[in-house]
Image (tube, rainbow, N blue to C red):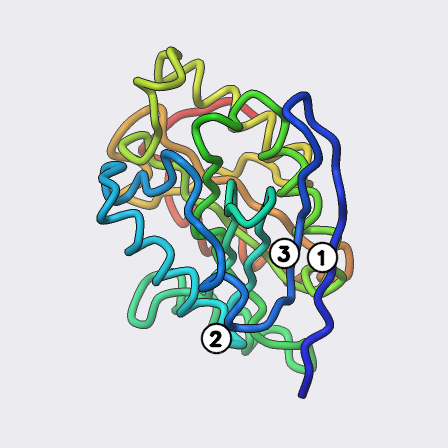
Amino acid sequence: MMVQMVEREVTTKKGMVRLVREFEPGFIADLCMGEGLGIFFHYRYEDAHKTKELLSTLSRSGDHRIACAVCSRNLIGYVTVVSTEQGSRWRMIEEALGKSAEGLRHPLLMELGSIEISKPWRSQGLARLLLGFMFDDPFFEDRIIFSRELSWHWDLKASGLSSYEYRSMLMRLFEGAGFRYCQTDDEEIGYAGENMLMVRVGSAVPAETALVFYRLVCRSEPRGWGWG
């Protein structure tokens, strides 16, 4: 079945950018990687292709969602929302939500996997526009999306910010897309004080389901700290 791509043009100080989602699997393969994409692969040119391959793989799966920012034929930014990892605490929470909310569409719980903007295109508001474009999709209104913000994934050197300043910037960014700070006793998040959990509860998610989720992510006093 032909995929109906959703597109939106936005204007930045550097020019017009096209935001796209729900595209054909081969769409990303035809793009060039923007400069500086590939934080998880240390920005090495040869390993930026690993990011491209990963995005191409995700785009071929109906279990994930991707939104991209494109200028000419260059991929200059992306955001991914992925399924919970098999065997993880988050998958167990998802399964518990399913049992408590029969009749709702699955998956009920998904993770914001990554968001990244090409270095020359940073400070243009693209991350905010890309997140807003992604979550305009009605698909997310009956789902809970969480983002584990871990400081060792942040590009502090390029930003010039301290870890706490970067944390505040990310909190504002995610709040603009409907996310809220959430207390948790998750060990990985609690490992460093600046880490945090951000959660977006879709407008069609029953209050009872959201309450079950909050109780499951914080079963004891949280190890980390934060402000909400």
Position of 68 with respect to 202 (left or right) is left
Q: Quadrant of the C terminus?
A: top right
Q: Residue at x 56, y 59 (%)?
A: 212
Q: Give whichever of discs 3 and 2 has the lower sequence position.
A: 2
Say which amino acid is labelled 1.
Ala
Image-quadrant location for residue 204:
bottom right
The reply to whether dot 1 and dot 3 touch (C-beta < 8 Å) is yes
Of tags 1 and 2, the one toward the viewer is: 2
- Toward the viewer: 67 or 168? 67
Position of 146 with respect to 42 (left or right) is right
Q: Position of residue 109 (x, y in %)?
A: 53, 63
Q: Residue at x 27, y 32 (%)?
A: 152
Say which amino acid is labelled 3.
Ala
Q: Judging from the image, what secondary structure is the residue with disc 1 in?
A: helix
- Toward the viewer: 170 or 124? 124
Mark seen at residue 210 = 3
Q: Give whichever of discs 1 and 2 has the lower sequence position.
A: 2
Q: Quadrant of the N terminus?
A: bottom right
Pointer 2 residue: 60
